[in-house]
Image: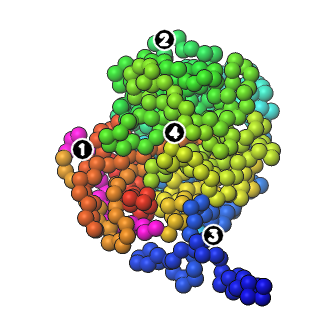
Amino acid sequence: MRISLFLSLLLVLAGPAWGQVRPTPGGPFAPPTTAPIEFDDAGRWDPPLMHDLNGFDPEPDKFNSVHLSLIPKGPHRGKLLVWDAGHTQATPEWKQRWAIVDVSQTGNGVYTNGELLLPTGYGDLFCAGHAWTGDGNLFVAGGTSVYPGGLDPDGDGDGDNGDGADHQGHFHGNKLTYVYDPSSGAMGTWIRLPDLQANRWYPTVTLLANGQMFVTGPKPTYEVFTLDTGGLSGSWQMNGPSQQFPGPAAFSIYPRVHQLFSGEQFCSGMWSFAAKLDHAAAPGSWTFTDASQFDYKNYVTSVLLPNVPGSVQDRVMLIGGEAFIGLTSQGVLEDVEVCNAGESSAPAWDWTPMPPMKRKRQHANGTLLPDGSVLVIGGRSNTLFDGRGAAARVPELFKDNSWRDLAPQRSDRTYHSTALLLPDGKVVSAGGDTSKFDYEVFSPPYLTSGLPRPEIVSAPTLLEYSGRTSALYTVEFEKMAGAAVEQVVLMAPGSVTHHTDYSQRYVALPVRHVTETSVHFLGPESTGWAPPGFYMLFLVTGDGVPSVSKWVRVL
């Protein structure tokens, strides 16, 4: 008995039990400390961050990162462009609070705050849609012009925004369009573009394969903006459907429109249908498919899954959401479905059930990771918008056709939450109406497993399409012990709002030869696979561990 107690005491003094701590990895990835490090397969959250509100006038009570984008060029490359919810009280001027945020320093954030003065009578950029252009500028369309019981945008006291319609008690969209150039000025420059042809609230913006910006929702029309040389001006083309849409509404709010690898556009279902379009070949002509067994899915997460050369392409995944049959809610789901959206007809394009998540979620963020997995963060399991008692703080990872729980975060991330991949392979989680903290940074399991990580020494800054040139590109990296580089992956910079980012993209490049210190590969196959623009280039080992990325531009 005494011997047993003595051994137990020695074990307690020695630290965690064997099997919970692995030897510290050597080489260039050894941490700058001699203390033991615990490695795990659940990932790890950095200490949460609060947004420094200094510089806003008047200073708000909090900052809610409802709109979050990763800057791909200029002096703030790799930092976050954020803006928050709109105003709800009368004011003579419409302003949009926005900021550039750097969360790369563990335990600290660097915040540069600004205010964008907006044109009188139009509204603000809260509830706009946005996506990065091929020139590395952020394209922003729509927003809010009327708040229930709040602002009268044109100041004439009639409760409309100049269109003569009575919007009292309802939000209403606007026609604003801006482009944000991150390489101009100390904080970047906002440039107003020609107005949309329709007011749009909760619209989706999708970068097309030809570099045009596709804007749709909630109306049954869509508009395409063609950027001029330099990407700071352009013109609109309005398109209506050439046939009747099924269901009571065509697209609803933030329609889930993805640019497929095939070059087509795909809306992954709102009202009892999904739809496919080839805008370049047949503007306005949609092909309708069956969406799922439900008549409607609200606030579902939609992700275009990774493409891998030689495998099935154009697979779209729907995750969770609140389901309806008719007008009757069936509650929030843990269900997951996948559609082979690139197929031409049923049954090949029918939605197929996948293993469900471990918990019900809507308003969750689905983020593609460079190892090919899908990280789902936040959401809530009930139908109350404040998420009372139902916030899902445990992320889930979809990999190898199964879901597993990861380390819980400290803040609720429900409605108006955001998340995106950072250049170092971490993920930032932000926003949410009931959040306690403004930003949380997560290291996925591939960064906490203790496995060797590639370190890039040199990489190209420009890639051309392999359909145009057979030239090989080379990335050199530090030699590793016990691991080998197997993949070169492009990840599009995120631009997310209201848990939606339909332009995020994973592109596996064709690898031709690998040595102990270099990998030789081709550029992306076509503009459908990787629309022109800026990407993060990751090297990924056979164990699924990514390097810190290097920025490249695809032309």
Judging from the image, what secondary structure is the residue with disc 4 in? strand
Q: Which mark lies nearer to you, 3 or 4?
A: 4
Q: Which mark is residue 243?
A: 2
Which circle's residue, 2 or 3, is located before the other in the chain? Answer: 3
Q: Which mark lies nearer to you, 4 or 2?
A: 4
- Return the residue at label 4: 303
Judging from the image, what secondary structure is the residue with disc 3 in? loop
Q: Which residues are magenta?
A: 451-469
Please tell me in which quadrant of the rendered image residue 114 appears.
bottom right
Which circle's residue, 3 or 1, is located before the other in the chain? Answer: 3
| Front residue of this view, candidates 445 and 462 | 445
Badge 4: residue crowd in 10 Å (few <14, some 14–19, many ≥20): many
Q: Which mark lies nearer to you, 4 or 1?
A: 4
C-alpha gap between disc 3 and disc 1: 42 Å
282 shown above or below 5? above
Asked whether the residues under the numbered discs 4 and 2 touch, taking CB atoms below 8 Å apart as contact, a structural biologist would say no
Q: Quadrant of the C terminus?
A: top left
C-alpha gap between disc 4 and disc 1: 25 Å
C-alpha gap between disc 4 and disc 2: 27 Å
In the rendered image, is residue 28 in sight?
Answer: yes
Which residue corresponds to the image point at 48% horizontal and 11% vertical from the top-left? Answer: 243
**Tag 4: residue type?**
Val
In the rendered image, is residue 228 in sight?
Answer: no
| Front residue of this view, candidates 185 and 430 | 430
- Return the residue at label 1: 466
Which circle's residue, 1 or 2, is located before the other in the chain? Answer: 2
> Residue 59 placed where, x, y %?
74, 56
Q: Which mark lies nearer to you, 1 or 2?
A: 1
Which residue corresponds to the image point at 46% horizontal and 76% vertical from the top-left? Answer: 25
In this figure, which colouring scheme has been used for the structure? Answer: rainbow
Q: Which mark is residue 107?
A: 3
